Image (tube, rainbow, N blue to C red):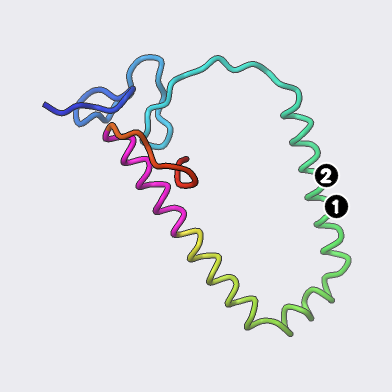
Amino acid sequence: PLSCGEGHTGLLCSSCMDSYYDNGGVCSECTDLEWDPGWLAGLCAVAVVVLMLSGVAWYHRAWIHDMYEKYHDRVEEWWCQLEMLLFTWQIIMYLSRVHRFRGGNGYPAPFSF
């Protein structure tokens, strides 16, 4: 008999038990959420910073374009390295979820999500 991970039930452990929700293929326990005004303040602060940075980038768009043209090869190299890092992180994240789904204890830090 197949043993499902915590919160999983049903055919091939594909469903979540009561008081659990599907969190990208992993059943996570529902918790009571309380409204925290700090989230709204933080979101507003992030929005203000993004708008300010967008304004500065728009104002200096010619300089940014010149720098991009000057360092195009280096920017492309960094972008490729960033893509490889993100793909590797996604693979580790999905392997960790599969491991927990099968009843494992998860991966040690810094690979646990």
Left or right of 35 in this view: 8: left
Residue type at mark 2?
Val
Main structural element of the magenta stretch: helix, strand or loop? helix
Tag of residue 95: none
Which residue is at 15% across, 28% downward?
2
In this orientation, which residue lies closer to the viewer: 12 or 54?
12
Left or right of 52 in this view: 92: left
Left or right of 17 in this view: 70: right
Which residue is at 47% across, 40% downward?
113
Which residue is at 43% across, 21% downward?
29
In this orientation, which residue lies closer to the viewer: 37 or 97?
97
Where is residue 52? Give x, y as percent: 85, 52
Residue 98, picture quadrant: top left
- Give the extent of the magenta segment: 88-102
Answer whether residue 94 is magenta in the image: yes
Where is residue 106? Give x, y as percent: 37, 37
* Numbered label tally: 2
> Farthest front residue?
108
Instruction: Kindly indicate whether the residue at mark 2 contacts the one at mark 1 (C-beta within 8 angstroms).
Output: yes
In this orientation, which residue lies closer to the viewer: 108 or 12?
108
In the picture of the structure, the residue carrying the numbered disc 1 is 52
Image quarter in which the N terminus is found: top left
In the picture of the structure, the residue carrying the numbered disc 2 is 48
